[in-house]
Image: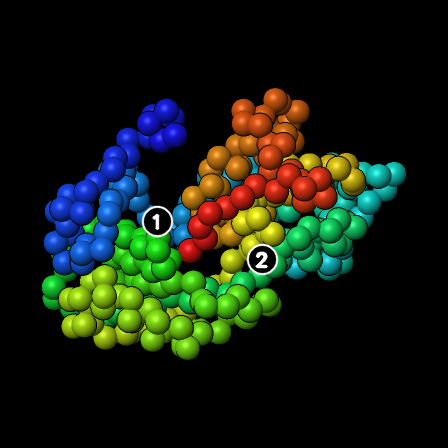
């Protein structure tokens, strides 16, 4: 599929994988995939970049304001309430991440999104790894790591998902992360954990996003439920949602990501979530 779509990714043997990062244990690796154009970004800086460009284009950005209500009249969204303020509108885009279900409920829409905590850990700086190397994901376990602030950022999924808006660090997952880290990258035994922090995945029943109009009320659109992929998908989703809002034909078919897929039994199967 990648080749068909023109993605410059290639399949690597274990030896070719070791050439990218000699410190990597590839004794049990059958093959790897690698794309030279892939990368990773700081989400906070990326968000600020979006906000700067939006403001320059004339958008009004209100930060720190809680949505208290969404008024619906004659089957269409009419206004969004922020405390004692009301924003008159014809469209509402629910891009509230892990809180998207709560926001949708204000408009009488049931969106199946469950918040799940993910914890990552960052090591102190240490010798033994190149200054730059590709982000690595071990798909057998979900363990991943990349460079961060002079050290290494790493994480992996918990054994069991715990529903809820918990953003405290799950230190119980650290031994599993360290065990896998030392196996896959033995040189990490030289590192010490500097810090950890947690955030929320916004999981849907099939781990795929919900994008586009929800049916009723008219004017209410979803752009949520990305199950950890939101930053990567954001540029394309923003363009698609803007096409829907302006009445243009979406450049990508959105039916597979529609909210009603869950009621129709046409959910999209996801093979791996890290």
Q: Secondary structure at mark 1?
A: loop
Q: Which mark is residue 272?
A: none
Q: Nearer the viewer, residue 148 or 226?
A: 226
**Which of the 4 image quarters holds residue 79?**
top right
Corner quadrant of residue 174: bottom left
Q: Residues within 10 Å of mark 2 (few under 14, many from 20)?
A: many
Pick whichever, 53 or 69, lies toward us.
69
Q: Residue at x 53, y 37 (%)?
A: 238
Mark 1 surroundings: few (<14), some (14-19) or many (≥20) residues within 10 A: few
Extreme residue toward the right, this view? 74
Does residue 223 appear in the picture of this structure? Answer: no
Q: Could you tell me which secondary element the residue under label 2 belongs to?
A: helix
The quarter of the picture where the C terminus appears is bottom left
* Residue behind mark 1: 41
Q: Which residue is mark 2?
A: 98
Residue 222 picture location, percent across and down:
64, 43
On the image, the x and y values in percent for residue 34 come to 26, 41
- Give me the residue at 32% from left, 63% from top: 154
User: Which residue is depicted at the point 58% across and 61% down?
Assistant: 115
Circle 2 or circle 1, nearest the eye: 2
The relative height of residue 156 versus residue 173 in the rendered view (above or below) is above
Q: Earlier in the sequence, mark 2 or mark 1?
A: 1
Classify the position of the N terminus by image quarter.
Answer: top left
């Amino acid at each position: 599929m990648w080749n068909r779509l023109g993605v410059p990714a290639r399949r690597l043997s274990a030896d070719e994988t070791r050439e990218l990062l000699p410190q990597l244990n590839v004794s049990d690796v059958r093959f790897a995939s690698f794309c030279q154009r892939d990368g990773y970004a700081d989400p906070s800086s990326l968000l600020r970049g979006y906000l700067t460009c939006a403001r320059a284009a004339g958008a009004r950005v209100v930060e720190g304001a809680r949505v208290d209500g969404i008024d619906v009249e004659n089957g269409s969204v009419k206004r969004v309430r922020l405390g004692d303020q009301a924003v008159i509108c014809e469209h509402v885009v629910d891009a509230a991440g892990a809180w998207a279900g709560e926001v949708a409920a204000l408009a009488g829409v049931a969106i199946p999104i469950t918040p799940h905590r993910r914890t990552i850990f960052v090591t102190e700086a240490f010798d033994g790894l190149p200054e730059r190397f590709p982000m690595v994901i071990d798909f057998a376990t979900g363990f991943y790591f990349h460079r961060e602030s002079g050290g290494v950022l790493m994480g992996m999924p918990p054994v069991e998902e715990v529903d809820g808006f918990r953003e405290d660090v799950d230190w119980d997952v650290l031994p599993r992360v360290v065990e896998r880290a030392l196996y896959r990258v033995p040189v990490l035994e030289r590192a010490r954990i500097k810090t950890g922090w947690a955030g929320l995945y916004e999981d849907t029943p099939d781990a795929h996003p919900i994008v586009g109009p929800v049916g009723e009320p008219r004017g209410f659109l979803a752009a949520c439920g990305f199950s950890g992929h939101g930053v990567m998908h954001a540029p394309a989703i923003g363009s698609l949602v803007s096409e829907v809002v302006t009445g243009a034909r979406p450049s990508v078919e959105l039916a597979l990501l529609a909210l009603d897929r869950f009621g129709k039994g046409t959910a999209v199967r996801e093979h791996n979530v890290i």
